[in-house]
Structures are given as C-alpha cells and as structure tokens.
Amino acid sequence: MPAPDRQPGKRLLRLQLNGRWREDAVAESMLLVDYLRSVAHLTGVKTGCDGGECGACTVLVDGEAVPSCITLTVRCDGRSVETVEGLAVQGRLSRLQLAFHEKLGTQCGFCTPGMIMASEALLRRNPSPTSDEIRAALSGNLCRCTGFVKILESVKAAAGACNDR
Amino acid sequence: MTADPTVDGKIVGRGIPLIDGREKVTGSARYTADLAHADALVGRILRSPVSHGNIVRLDVSRARALEGVRAVVTGDDCPHCYGVLPIAMNEYPMARERVRYRGEPIAAVAAVDAETAERAIRLIELELCALPAHYTSADARASGAILLHDDKPGNLEREVHHEFGDLQQGFAEADLVREERFSCAEVNHAQIEPHACLVDYDSLTGRLLVQSVSQVGYYLHLTLARCLEMDASRIRVVKPFVGGGFGARVEVLNFEIITALLARASCGTVFMQLSREETFLTHRARPQTDIALRLGMRRDGRITACACEVVQRGGAYAGYGIVTILYAGALLQGLYDIPAIKYDGFRVYANLPPCGAMRGHGSVDTRHAFECLLDRMVHDLGLDPIAVRRANLLKAPTRTLNDLMVNSYGLAECLDAVERASGWRDRIGRLPAGKGLGVACSHYVSGAAKPIHWTGEPHAVVNVRLDFDGGITALTGAADIGQGSSTMVAIAVAETLGVALDRVRVIAADSAVTPKDNGAYSSRITFMVGNAAIDAAKKLKAILVNAAAHKLEAKPDDVEVIGEVFRVGRAEQASIPFADVAKAALVDRGAITVTGTFTCPPEAQGGRHKGGAVGSTMGFSYAAQVVEVSVDEATGAVTVDKVWAALDCGHAINPLAVEGQIQGSVWMGMGQALYEETRYTDGLPVHASLLEYRMPTIADSPPIDVHIVESHDPYGPFGAKEASEGALASFPPALVNAIANAIGIDLNELPATPDRIVDALIRRRRQAKLALARKATS
C-alpha cells in the first residue's frame, strides 16, 4: 500500500485542530465540514443547506469565521482550525457558550455552534461591538427559532462579561 | 382536572435556561445526522422529473447490479397508502403507477457510499407519460380539468360549509359592509436542520430501530408497522436532538418509510440525509391561500356579521388538508364576539408538493385577511383600531357559536400592554412621513382537544420514577424539538414535588422506554403533558409524604415539603431530608414508578357539526401586537423598526422560554409577511435553497418587546396555556396595517414585497393624475 502522501488524489495534511496538531491523509476535494465531521468526529459542525447559505457550518480558520462547507480542507494546511468543541476549557464553558445558554440564545440548538463561532470571531477582533456590528458579523448565520433577539442579547452579555474582567 | 394555579412558584415563574442547553452550546448534542453511521449504507431517492404523469416503465436492474448497491426499492415494494389522517390516506412512500408532483419519490437505493448510491440512481431507467398538470387552485377546479385523484371530483379534497347565527340580519344591521379578496403565498417551515433518518433492521431478531427527526414518533411507529407489514412490537422509534420542526415533521414523511424499506431489504443500517432542496420538496407547509372576506360593522365599531370563503392549494396528496381547511374557518371564532358567521372552505389538489401543518396551521391566512379588513373598515368609519377591537371582546368564560370553549381570556390586557408600550395614543396619526404603526390580534389552541387517533387512551401520559439513588426520572414520549418541552416537564415535576430542579432528569421520546405521546403538534405539550406530569408528581408526592409521615409518626396531612425537606410544623427534629424519605418509601416495594395522565373531557372537544372538533381546545392563547415600520416610497422597501407583542399564555411556567417562543413566532410571521414565498416553474421549485427562500437574517430582524399576560387558565398546568403559535398570525396583518398607516396603501397580497408596494404607489399616482385631468376638463 503506497504511503499516504502518494495515494492517488490524497495529500498529507497537517493542521492544528482545537489547539492540537494532527496529520491526516485527505483527498484534495474533501470539504472542511466533511473532514471535521467524519475524520475528526466533531459533529458539532453542522450542515444546514446545500452550500454556503446558512452559516451552520461556521468554524474559525486562523481566527476568522469561514463556512466550512465551501472550504477545501487542504487549504487549511498548516493553519489553526477551531470548532465549538474547542471553546470550553477543562469543562468550563466559554463566556459566549454560557451567555447563549443562560440568555436562551439557543432553542433547537442547530444553528448554535455556527452562531457561537461567528460571534467568537467577532469578539476577538471587536470586544465591545455595537448592535449593528453584531448584526453585520452574524448576518450570514440563519436561525429559525429565536428571531435573533436573544442571540443579540447573548453576544452583548458575553461581550459585557469579557469587559468586566 | 388537575391544574393548581395557586402554587407559589419557586421554579415555576422563574426564567430557566433549557435543561439540555449545555449540550447545544458545546456541540455535544447529537442530531440525527450526528448519530454514528460510518458503517451504515447510504440512501438516495430517485424523484419524478415531471409534475404529473403515468409511470410507463421503471427498470432498476442496472442499478441493482452495480457493485456496492445493497438494495433498491420502488413503489412495488409498498402497496400500502399512508397519511396523517386515518380518513384521508392516499399517498404512497414511492409512487405507484402515477406521479403527481415534480420531486415525488419513485425509487430508492441503499449503497456502500454516497457516490455509488448516486451512480445507481442515474442507472435507473424511467419512462413517464406526461399528463396535464395544475399549478393553481383555479386551474385544478376548472371544469374538465384532469383529476389528480379519481375519487375527488373537481380536485377537491374537502369542502366545508358552516353557518352560525343570522347572517342576513347581521349584514342588515351593519352601517358599513365591505368585501375584499386576499391572497397569501405558500411558505415553508425552513427549519435549519435538513431532514434525515437512520434506520437499522436486524434480520436475526426482525427488529427495526428508527432514529429520526419526527415530531410525533407515535405516528411514525404506526405507519412503519402498516407500510412494512410489521408487528409494531418489533419497532422502536427514538428521537435524537431535533433542529426545529414548526410542523414540518408532524406527519410521517415519505423518506422515513423509504429508509425503513431499504434497511429491511438490505438487512442492515441505512442512513438517509436529504439535501436542503429535497427538504423543501418534502414540504408539508402552509398552502397558497385565497380568501374572500365580507364584514359588517356598526358605526360604533361592533362587528355584526362575517362571511368568509377560503381556497387552499393543498398540493398533490391529502395529508393534513381536511384539518387545515377546517382550521381556516373554525378560528374565525374564539377571538372576538361575532354574532353571525358563514364559512365556506375549499381544499384543492394541485400538482405540487403536498402541504401540511405549519405554525398556526390553517388559521393564519384567514386571521390575516380578517385583521386587515377590520382595520380598513375602522378607518372608513373614522374610529381607532385598538378601540374597535376592545369593543368586540368576548366575555369569558363562554362558548363560541361553533362550540369552542373560552375559559381564560387575556386579550384586553394584551391590547392594553401593546397600546401603552408602543406609545400608540400619542403617536398614531402623528408619525413622520413614511412611518406607520399597525395593530392586530390573534389566537391559537393549546393542543387540539380531540386527538387524531381515538384509542380510548388518555391524551397524555407521563411516568415518574424514583429509585435508591434518590434521583427523580420523568419519562415522556413528548418530542422536544427546541421549544423546551423537556425543560417544562422537569419544572412541573420538580415544582410539584418540592425538590430542586437538578434532582429531576427527563428521558424523552424512546418508544421502548417512554410512554406513548401524541406528539409536538397544535401546541399541546405544555397543557396536556404538563398536566400529566403534575398528576404523576402528585402521586409520587403522596407516596413520599406517607413514608415521611410514617417515620415522623405524624398524619400525612401535617407533612410539608420545603426545600427537599419533609417536616411537621417548625420543629427541626421533626424533619427528614429527601434521601431518607426516598429510602423509606422504597421499603417493601422497591423502585417506584407512578403514572400521571391527562385527558380533555368530551365537552372540550368542539361542536357536533361536521368537522366540529377542529379548533377545539381546553384553552386559547391570545395575542396582540403593534408593528412600527418605515417605508421607502422610492424602492418599496419596508423596514420593521420595532414590534411590541403581548401574549396571554395563562401563566408563564418558564418566562424565558415563553419570551423566546413569542419572539420566534412573531419573527416567523414577519418572514411570511415580508419576504418568504415558494415559487415553482412547471412544478420545479426555484425557491429550494436558503439563498432563494428569503427568510430574514439578523440584519433584517427588529427588536421584539414581549409582554407576558397571565389570565390564569383554570385547567392549564399552573394555569398555563400555549405560547408558541398564538402570536404568529397577528404579525402579517399588523404589518400590512402599518404600511397602510405609513403610506396609505392597502395591500391584499402576501408577501408585501417592494415590487408590490411600488406598483401600488405607481397605480395611485396614475389614478390621481387621471382624476386631476378629468377635473381640469370638466
């Protein structure tokens, strides 16, 4: 059996996933969402549409929110990829996770991982966003349950909690 | 009846995060597509490329022969029709002889991976002889139109004709009679989780395990037994986390039966994931509806008569159709006091994906027409829209003309709340150009009082278990689809028992373990399952109190439970902690399981006229909302600046969840009012993506101020009624009324798109010019 980096159509990929480096043989055409869900077994990353339309698959690549369903895995070679599973530290929920939970920014929960990751990217670059800035940052994440009211409140609460430190 | 509205809430009435919230925010919650299925076969469906046709030839031999294909099924493999209503089952999981909508399943394949399954689908040879297709109700009803179903002349699934009171006298008494026609586009639930199911058939035991997105596992269970000709006792239906329903999943869906057939044919596990396009094709949502409405009103604003005709374009199969067309008329009543009502409803077949139930069911589009016309007549008479609604309130308790119970009625308080919060009195008529305020009311049932399957069983059953570990387990078949029903059950049990919320765990929706539940439909769970949970908890409490009384050598009546401590009077030594009481209760009998039930009595189940059960409920929720808009006359763009929504939910068991549901339903109404519509070209759905099906994003979504009104229903659990559907139907008319207030344009079509507004403005300018020209020449 040929070595992984010489298998037809597959490339050796090395990336940092939720803080830990890993190596996998990955087909050139493999989408990041499929890699995360079926190779890395991180089912927190969701598929909600037929490509790039709903934001449920949002993850962070080098700190930026990207739609993993239209991102090729091989483009993440050497980069840092973060999913919702990586946010809690030793069982302690992040400020965003806690806020979404306590403020009911999540109802059915299906859009929640993507919504939280997009919010995380926002708060990292803008720790005190205005309502308009939150809306702009999350405009690519669809939710059908909340009407977005409590999502906005959750992000604001998390931002406030960050700033209280 | 089991309600106890006077319980002083220690948990009830506090805003509680959902008990399964942690799983959702950490990504550990497993939805159907997240369940382990690496070794499962992959299912794919071949769908009809034409809207209407006879199957001339279907040859699956090449697909079957492809390496890696384990099973191929067609309509021949299931001769049993199905449908959510036992009296209207005319659909097959895969078409037999005839296809009736573009996208209808014809065959399906299970293979070792997705690529193989898709190649196999392309190898299936299909010949169809196309038939004329109907895409509108008018075409379908035209004389000589080809019938979709031979036993349904005129392509009518159902006609409804109801008349109550003296209509002629009502209109004669009116100072103003006005008639208008409205048209509401078909919309879709568009829940974020696409459809999926995972089915395992064990050929050794003959057992079927189904894990699916269903809102009613019970119907799925029955239907699989029927369609697979299996003993129901060999079937197990489990609900994983579900990413939204809104009615999309209250019916058994064709792909679920298909996957089960594939699993059995391949003697293995099959995973079926529908694309978003296929999820749209599966549909079962709110039909395109035409409403002709005539109202009579006295000079003082009192409504004297109402005549309403509704035509619903129901799609290709029966589904929920009979109930939908009945709801459209039934809920004309129960909101206001109307002395004479005539309703004529027509449910029509068309060669389009079948419609079904969607939040608010058939009541939404009718309520829209009513609240819009009401406002226009109020305007004609120079009256105030809120004052007129007040003038037509019911006096509870009462029964409507169509025999629906109204036991608690907080509509007046809802109107007061939104009038005050929006600053209506100070602002109406004084807003700047292009800005408007609009008001509307709505209501909905807290569960249909008559279940779909009349088995003689209670309408809700909850088991509560206590064992040596002191943990309380509530077992319910109720499907939590994100609305928080499991949290509600935990609260009801903990509150009744007087224990901490985290002593209670809820196990839900596993047919091998939990008692059967009639499902998450018609917003029944809080009312019915909540009452059953309280009933069970009371029974367990009695056992525990008896055990404590025995240990304390006191009478059970003297035992109080406060903060998980059982005590007699104030003395510290006369108290026992929960764990010790539990151990004492287990002596001689071991692990305790109690059963609590709830049933709607016959007098709650509606009138004796045909279809009279639809609309019946133990309690209606009531809503009023005020919508503020800014309209750009140049582009027709409407911005919703703010919404004030008040809903009477009887009592908010969990105010945080209630607010969330009200906001969500108001927002969903906004989507229907402004943006959403399905669109078909020769039956091909051109809306079938989340880009084309334009639901509002966070950028389009306004602040929604919620006011919870509590009328304390005498029969609801802790006085509660539903809170998830009631507020939806008042948004679209409040919006259209606000647009009228802003720019003086009356719109009769939903959605209220910029094109329609600009067209209306152009028409008005043209008419004004013509009028001026005529004046000049006269």
Image (tube, coloured by chain):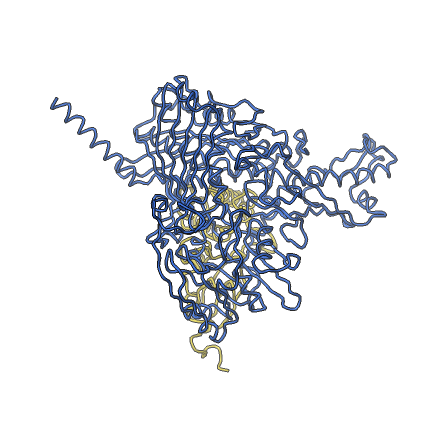
Residue B206: image x %, image y %? 64, 65
Residue B665: image x %, image y %? 48, 39
Quarter residue B496 falls in: top right
Quarter residue B454 falls in: top right
Residues B734 and B89: in front is B89
Does B274 sit above or below residue B672?
Answer: below
Asked whether residue B664 appears in the rendered view, the answer is no
Residues B556 and B713: in front is B713
Residues B278 and A7: in front is B278
Outermost right residue: B553
Quarter residue B122 falls in: bottom left
Quarter placement of the C terminus of chain B: top left
Outermost bottom residue: A1
At 27% from the left edge and 39% from the top edge, which residue is drawn? B635
Does A5 sit above or below residue B683?
Answer: below
Kindly indicate which chain is depicted in blue in the rendered structure.
Answer: B
Q: How many marks?
A: 0
Asked whether residue B157 appears in the rendered view, the answer is yes
At 82% from the left edge and 47% from the top edge, which residue is drawn? B586
Outermost top residue: B300
Quarter placement of the N terminus of chain B: top right
Residue B676: image x %, image y %? 38, 44
Rendering colour (chain A)? yellow
Residue B314: image x %, image y %? 43, 46
